[in-house]
Amino acid sequence: MATTTSIVSPAPTPFDSPGRGADLVIITSDGTILYVVKAFLIYASPFFANLLGDSSPDETYENLPVYRSSEDCSTMCAVMRLCYPATIGSETTAEVSVVDALQKYMMEDAQERLKEVICSSGMMKTEPIKIFAIACRYRWADIARAAAKEILRIPLLEWENSAELHSITGMDYHFLQQYFLECSRASVDALSGFFFQPWSTDPPGLTINAEDRSSLDAALDCSCSSTDIALHYITGGAPFENFCGHQWLCDFILQARARLRDSPGADITSDELMGVAVYAAGKACNESSAQEVGRIVRVINKGLQAVIEKVELKLDF
């Protein structure tokens, strides 16, 4: 028998009014009234397709059928936005409660849409540890790897204590730390091999493609006084290429190496490091313009990214 309920708390747009074609009311666990379009739910969810096939609802509100949800307003609004065809805004965030609800209601397409939101929004950069934990919980391997790469920007001792970490295994966390330390070692080793004393043999070096090699050659071609430190890199498996280096560049590499030891995903083209290099190059080498310094640093950074890409993140699933 149809009954009537009373409104408890207002809902956010676009679920706050029946004027947008709403033909179903959802009452959340915290008493919020959501006006929704039934067709979107039927299309997105076999659960709702079966539930709403009943033409005799047990409860109504303003002559609309009612579904009482065990999820709160924030969770159900996120679920609804993932089902609606409109553009998803910043209101939709990655939460365990949201994914649990999507799985409960069998909304597979909406889960895929949430993954796209995670990858395209700022969540991956601002909350990478949280995203990693959620990805491990639901076995989203691609998102776990993308989040782990973002975590490389954060020093190990500064990792946040995200509540979502409670839901992953100790092995998941161990593999993340192992990945971080291996990336740190690989990037530091690569930069350590980029400059060496003349008596060194077979250092590791950076692999640089032919186009970037030409750019680096031009930037390093300078007639000013150079140090007795040589620079080298590898081009597609070819023998080591050696050049006389500038002291400012060697100093920059030392600073970058220290930064990468703590944060292997750090951007060595940042204004802080680049500014010091440009200033030092201007004092020591008149032919080294800011543009040339930037070119050298960008080539080195690109080589480092290739080094990081070769490190594998193990996953416990």
Image: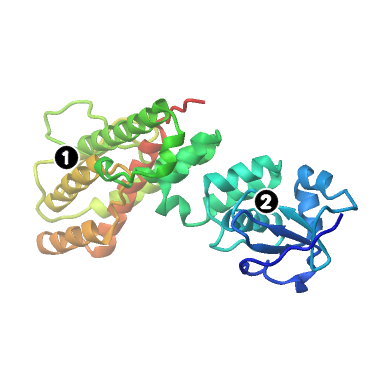
- Residue identifier under label 1: 230
Q: How many marks?
A: 2
Residue 205 position in % (x across, y down) = 27, 34
- Can you tell which of label 1 and label 2 is closer to the viewer? 2
Q: Residue at x 12, y 34 (%)?
A: 197
Residue 122 position in % (x across, y down) = 47, 57
From the viewer's perspective, tell me whether residue 281 is left or right of residue 127. left
Label 2 SS = loop
Q: Nearer the viewer, residue 197 or 114?
A: 114
Whole-angstrom CA distance, mark 1 to mark 2, is 68 Å
Snapshot quadrant of residue 34: bottom right
Q: Residue at x 71, y 53 (%)?
A: 68
- Would you place residue 223 above or below residue 182 in this image? below
Say few, some or many: other residues with alpha carbon within 10 Å of mark 2 (under 14 / 14 to 19 / 20 or more). Answer: some
- Would you place residue 119 above or below residue 279 in this image? above
From the viewer's perspective, tell me whether residue 174 is left or right of residue 278. right
From the viewer's perspective, tell me whether residue 24 is left or right of residue 98. right
Residue 4 position in % (x across, y down) = 78, 63
On-image quarter of the N terminus: bottom right
Question: Which amino acid, by three-letter code, is at mark 2?
Answer: Ser
- Residue identifier under label 2: 69
Instruction: Report if the CB atoms under discs 1 and 2 are less than 8 Å apart.
Output: no
Residue 111 position in % (x across, y down) = 64, 45
Say few, some or many: other residues with alpha carbon within 10 Å of mark 1 (under 14 / 14 to 19 / 20 or more). Answer: many
Q: Nearer the viewer, residue 102 or 296?
A: 102
Label 1 SS = strand
Question: Which amino acid, by three-letter code, is at mark 1?
Answer: Ala
Outermost residue, right direction?
A: 55
